[in-house]
């Protein structure tokens, strides 16, 4: 029995799909290294994330199955359920066999579960977009706090970045202790403590704050590649909830 272990990122999971295909191996299970316990009865294979391989898989899904299928896969990934990794793997393999009509096979257990989970995450994203209220904590700096059931920060951020292009803002996920930070140019998701902001003095120059964030994520010990890689690639943003 072969188990694939990856870093927990979306790109990492897509790399697992790539390696499985070219190694002609069907994994018994797929685990994130964060939650994985050593299996003494089977054979564990750690797969290093490869962006090029991930992109090839994503492009293949978008063209051979559909962009909607890729979006559904991404939403299922954001559900954060341990069982979602094998579910996504099975859905992709089935999709490459059936093609663009896969989601018409709603009576298939795999398709049904992917559709159900995707809808739940999509609904959660819609709900957050409707309910989020920002509070100005310092002049020119707005913060909103949420605690969604699913990890929807990567889904909702393009909406707010487009809507509030001329503002500094942070959306903090209290459940996961993650912050999505926007600096009028781009956004990142980081696990840097939100409390760091409260120590800032009143100032118009919040460039200092964002330099602090960017500097912190560049420190080797603080690098969190899983966070940096969990966003849907920008070329697929038009498929996300807030764009529909």
Image (cartoon, rainbow, N blue to C red):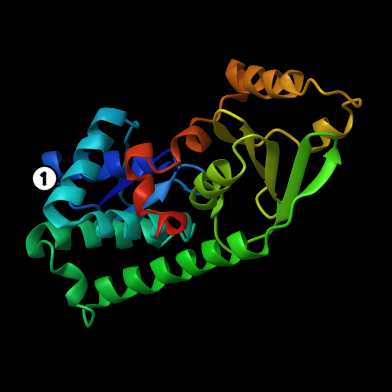
Residue 28 is at least partly visible in this image: no
Q: Which residue is mark 1?
A: 24
In this rendering, the answer to whether 188 lies above or below 14 is above
Residue 36 is at least partly visible in this image: yes
User: Which residue: 63% across, 21% down?
Assistant: 214
In this rendering, the answer to whether 132 lies above or below 108 is above
User: Which residue: 40% across, 54% down?
Assistant: 240
In this rendering, the answer to whether 217 lies above or below 24 is above
User: Which residue: 18% across, 77% down?
Assistant: 105
Q: Is residue 97 left or right of residue 120?
A: left
* Circle 1 residues within 10 Å: few <14, some 14–19, many ≥20: few
Q: Position of residue 219 (x, y in %)?
A: 62, 16
State the SS at label 1: loop
| Total count of labels | 1
Q: Position of residue 45 (x, y in %)?
A: 30, 39
Q: Position of residue 64 (x, y in %)?
A: 12, 52
User: Which residue: 68% across, 24% down?
Assistant: 213
């Amino acid at each position: 029995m072969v188990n694939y272990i990856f870093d927990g990122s979306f790109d990492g999971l897509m790399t697992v799909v790539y390696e499985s295909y070219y190694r002609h191996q069907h994994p018994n299970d797929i685990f994130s290294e964060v939650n994985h316990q050593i299996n003494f009865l089977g054979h564990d294979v750690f797969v290093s994330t490869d962006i090029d391989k991930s992109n090839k898989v994503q492009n293949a899904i978008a063209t051979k199955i559909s962009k909607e299928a890729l979006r559904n896969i991404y939403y299922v990934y954001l559900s954060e359920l341990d069982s979602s990794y094998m579910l996504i793997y099975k859905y992709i393999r089935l999709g490459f066999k059936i093609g663009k009509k896969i989601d018409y096979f709603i009576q298939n257990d795999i398709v049904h579960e992917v559709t159900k989970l995707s809808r739940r995450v999509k609904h959660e994203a819609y709900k957050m977009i409707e309910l989020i209220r920002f509070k100005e904590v310092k002049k020119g700096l707005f913060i909103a706090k949420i605690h969604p059931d699913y990890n929807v920060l990567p889904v909702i951020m393009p909406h707010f970045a487009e809507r509030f292009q001329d503002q500094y803002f942070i959306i903090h996920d209290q459940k996961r202790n993650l912050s999505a930070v926007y600096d009028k140019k781009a956004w990142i998701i980081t696990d840097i403590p939100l409390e760091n902001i409260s120590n800032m003095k009143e100032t118009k120059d919040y460039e200092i704050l964002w330099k602090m964030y960017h500097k912190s994520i560049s420190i080797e010990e603080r690098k969190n590649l899983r966070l940096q890689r969990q966003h849907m690639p920008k070329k697929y943003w038009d498929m996300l909830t807030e764009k529909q």
